[in-house]
Amino acid sequence: MPELHLMFSRQRRWMFFLLAIYVLGWGFTSYQTIFLGLVFGTSLSLFNLWLMVRKMKQFGDSISQGKKVRSLGSFSRFATGALAVVVSMRYPEHLHLISVVIGLMTSYIVIMIDFFIHSLQIHK
């Protein structure tokens, strides 16, 4: 499982970099609701990524010990997404709904980009 933690640390770095850009956009542009939505969605996306890594580690430990595996925590990640949408619909003057949804998808985009970059570096 060390590869999983290496991947997570690389992806977490990318997510923090994007969050820093979004915070700068929120602070220095007039599109504050859009950037705040991106910050909110990306923060929850980072939380979902952490949850997924934690559940995958538990899954691997359970399989190696021969125990039964319950789930990979999909419900928790769906609930986080639903919470983000509900909060953004409750406060539309502060959070842009589409930006929140894009922010929620950020971890999956970062995972794909990290995979392609890392696979290109390995095959050189």
Image (cartoon, grey):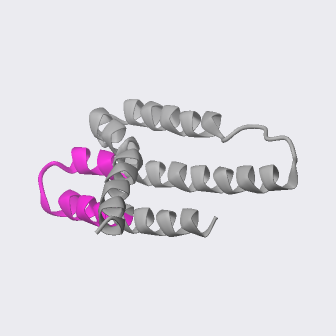
Q: Residue at x 50, y 63 (%)?
A: 8
Q: Main secondary structure of the magenta part?
A: helix
Residue 95 falls in which quadrant of the image? top left
Q: The C terminus lies in which quarter of the figure?
A: bottom left
Q: The N terminus lies in which quarter of the figure?
A: bottom right
Position of 16 relative to 106 (above/below): below
Residue extending furthest front? 124
Q: Residue at x 72, y 54 (%)?
A: 60
Please indicate whether residue 71 sits to the left or right of residue 84 in the image: right
| Of 18 and 71, the residue lying toward us | 71
Q: Residue at x 31, y 68 (%)?
A: 121
Residue 25 in the image, given as x and y percentages of width and height: 19, 59
Position of 121 relative to 49 (above/below): below
Please indicate whether residue 59 sits to the left or right of residue 97 in the image: right
Numbered disc total: 0
| Of 96 and 101, the residue lying toward us | 101
* Residue 19 on the magenta span: yes
* Segment tinted magenta in the rendering: 16-39
Q: Residue at x 31, y 48 (%)?
A: 38
Residue 19 in the image, given as x and y percentages of width and height: 32, 61
* Residue 35 on the magenta span: yes
Please indicate whether residue 101 sits to the left or right of residue 9 in the image: left
| Of 58 and 79, the residue lying toward us | 58
